[in-house]
Image (spheres, rainbow, N blue to C red):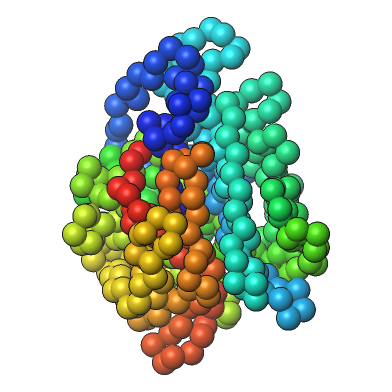
Amino acid sequence: MPPLPVISGLPRRHFLLAAGLMGLAEAGPAYALPPKVLQFPRDFGSHPDFKTEWWYITGHATSGAREFGFQLTFFRSRVEAAQGMASKFAARQLIFAHAAITDVQGNKLWHDQRIAREGFDIATASPQGMSIKLRDWTLQSNGNTHSANLPATDFALKLQLTDTQPVLLQGNRGLSRKGPDVKQASYYYSLPQLATRGTLQIKNQTFEVTGKAWLDHEWSQEVLHPSAVGWDWIGMNLDDGSALTAFRLRDKEGNAIWDGGSFRPAKGEAYSFSRGEVVFSPQRRWKSPLSKASYPVEWIVRTPADFYTVRAVIDNQELDSRQSTGAIYWEGLSELIDSNGKRVGRGYLEMTGYAAVLRM
């Protein structure tokens, strides 16, 4: 559940781009999303009539004794002010992207970002299937295999991710509530336990890696309640093949406005958590020298599946994305430990709204 593009928070050059050089109008009214049957491979693709959409991949990989986390996200944002413009240069859709590698042994996070208006073969997001391009960054699907190629500044990702399990529909068969108002919802599915292989490059070193990844895809008209300042989210691949999602949206006092998630065993049906079944309790904090934000880098997360400890592999996994989505947030590789103290999986923890209130 990555932080969404914040048009009003972008640098001036991006604000003008989003506004089509004519001033940004108010977005169209949000509405309650109806239940629907998601259809694949169509719903792997873009949904340009919706305000916001993202494809989000996180994972853990190894190369010999070296251990890495990786993250890549493509965002699409519909600009209502430009929808009626006839010009081919009108910024009707914006495409953003983030990429990051956590080098565990090197105790360092590498991060880069991109932004462009859709069109002219520079930035595209196909509505027919998962095929996204932002300059030289790409994410594409061919059957049950997904390919990501993101050459970035000082690092690069080139990965193949293969389905090992069926699609996991989050919420009510793919309709995921995100707040007390019915309009605060998204269509949301996941592909956990993706078998991963490929290369990670850092500076002049190239690592052949294997591991596991997690893909989330969401699209919506409105997600955040007006009193929400941000969210906490985990997506965890368990070693036994199970998959755990948990999240909460919180207010400025740190209280949960809404919570949810799911647990699917390696063999069996998924259980979607109801409101109030997920509780995040911070245990240890780390203060960022960049933003001065204080992030809980260790949590106890209570779910119907178990009481888990979620612990960051390294503390400093804060991302500064002010040149694209306009936010500073924490997102990084973390361990999942069960109530018996056994490490049972790895995945990603994301925390937004700690450096500043998240604006969408």
What residue sits 75% from the left and 73% below the top? Answer: 63
Q: Nearer the viewer, residue 59 or 114?
A: 114
Q: Position of residue 108 (x, y in %)?
A: 60, 66
Where is the C terminus found, in terms of image quarters? top left
Tell me what residue is drawn at x 71 percent, y 55 percent.
Answer: 155
Q: Nearer the viewer, residue 87 or 312?
A: 312
Residue farthest to the front, as pictured: 289
Q: Determine if residue 359 is in view.
A: yes
Nearest to the observer: residue 269 or residue 115 = 115
Q: Is residue 56 above or below residue 82?
A: below
Apparent side of residue 309 relative to residue 258 in the rendered image (left or right):
right
Coordinates of residue 15 in the picture (x, y in percent): 45, 26
Pick the residue in front: 201 or 94. 201
Residue 169 visible? The answer is: no
On screen, residue 134 above or below 237: above
Residue located 51% across and 39% down the image: 323
In the depicted structure, whether residue 166 falls above or below residue 307: above
Side of 185 relative to 331 (left or right): left
Residue 196, quarter of the rendered image? bottom right
Instruction: State the image coordinates of residue 205 (x, y, percent, origin top left).
Output: 80, 63
- Residue visible at 25% across and 45% down? 225
Of all residues shown, which one is farthest toward the bottom? 340
Q: 1 left or right of 87?
A: left
Q: Position of residue 74 (x, y in %)?
A: 57, 43
Above-or-below relation of 349 to 11: below
